[in-house]
Image (cartoon, grey):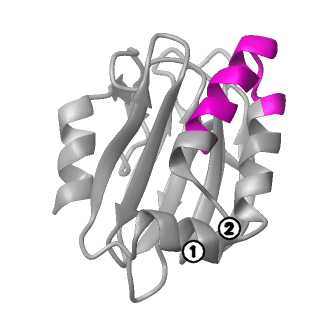
């Protein structure tokens, strides 16, 4: 049975033992081996939002729920991340910087669809965009190897894929509407 306090404690211990995403990914895989237990513990999301579960300078854990047909533009985290889907689906496009481009332009480099029970670890240099392609809320736990809410990072505007500073309040707004 999934227990949020145990999950948080296991994540804190994982980061203390290994500052990379590898040990935290194992914690997430254990949790997502029974996504219905995670859903039962956290509750069926009724509205979109970002709910912090734990936040420190070395680790942030958030519970995310987001609307159908929502797309989050390309962005980076400037820290590793581990995503675990406990309800719904998200489609990721992974991007890479175009070498030596003065405006920081990016190009698509791959894609991955995540469904209920899937876990996706990402290194600190990953750039991705995300879409909820299904007609209901998608719910996921995210573990970040740093302070997700305080880190300076970038996002790329969807039209021209030019780099700009990410505004965390804008991110919160995207997940709350």
- Residue 89, x across and y down, in percent: 57, 74
Give above or below for 1 relative to 19: below
**Extent of the magenta region:** 7-23
Dot 1 crowding, Cα within 10 Å, few <14, some 14–19, many 20+: many
Q: Residue at x 61, y 64 (%)?
A: 85
Q: Is residue 14 left or right of residue 143?
A: right
Callout 2: SS: strand
Question: Which label belongs to residue 143?
Answer: none
Q: Is residue 50 left or right of residue 41?
A: left
Circle 1/circle 2 CB separation < 8 Å:
yes
User: Is residue 97 visible to us here?
Assistant: no
Q: Residue at x 49, y 36 (%)?
A: 61
User: Is residue 149 visible to us here?
Assistant: yes
Where is mark 1, residue-wise? 89
Residue sitting nearer the eye, 108 or 136: 136
Q: Where on the picture, by quarter, is residue 147?
A: top left
Q: Residue at x 31, y 49 (%)?
A: 50
Callout 1: SS: strand
Was residue 2 drawn as part of the magenta stretch in this picture? no
Was residue 14 drawn as part of the magenta stretch in this picture? yes
Where is mark 2, residue-wise? 114
Whole-angstrom CA distance, mark 1 to mark 2, is: 6 Å
- Residue 156, x across and y down, in percent: 41, 37
Predominant secondary structure, magenta span: helix
- Residue 173, x across and y down, in percent: 17, 49
Give above or below for 30 relative to 163: below
Q: Residue at x 83, y 31 (%)?
A: 22
């Amino acid at each position: 049975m999934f227990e949020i306090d145990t999950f948080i404690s296991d994540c804190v211990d994982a980061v203390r033992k290994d500052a990379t995403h590898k040990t935290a990914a194992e914690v997430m895989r254990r949790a997502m081996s029974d996504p219905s237990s995670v859903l039962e513990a956290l509750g069926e999301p009724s509205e979109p939002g970002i709910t912090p579960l734990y936040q420190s300078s070395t680790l942030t854990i958030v519970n995310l729920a987001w609307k159908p047909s929502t797309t989050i533009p390309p962005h980076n985290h400037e820290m590793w991340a581990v995503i675990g889907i406990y309800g719904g689906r998200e489609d990721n496009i992974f991007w890479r910087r175009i070498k030596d481009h003065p405006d920081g332009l990016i190009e698509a480099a791959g894609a991955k669809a995540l469904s209920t029970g899937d876990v996706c670890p990402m290194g600190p240099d990953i750039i991705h965009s995300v879409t909820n392609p299904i007609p209901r809320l998608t719910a996921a736990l995210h573990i970040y190897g740093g302070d997700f809410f305080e880190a300076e990072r970038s996002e790329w505007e969807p039209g021209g894929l030019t780099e700009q500073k990410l505004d965390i309040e804008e991110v919160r707004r995207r997940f709350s509407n």
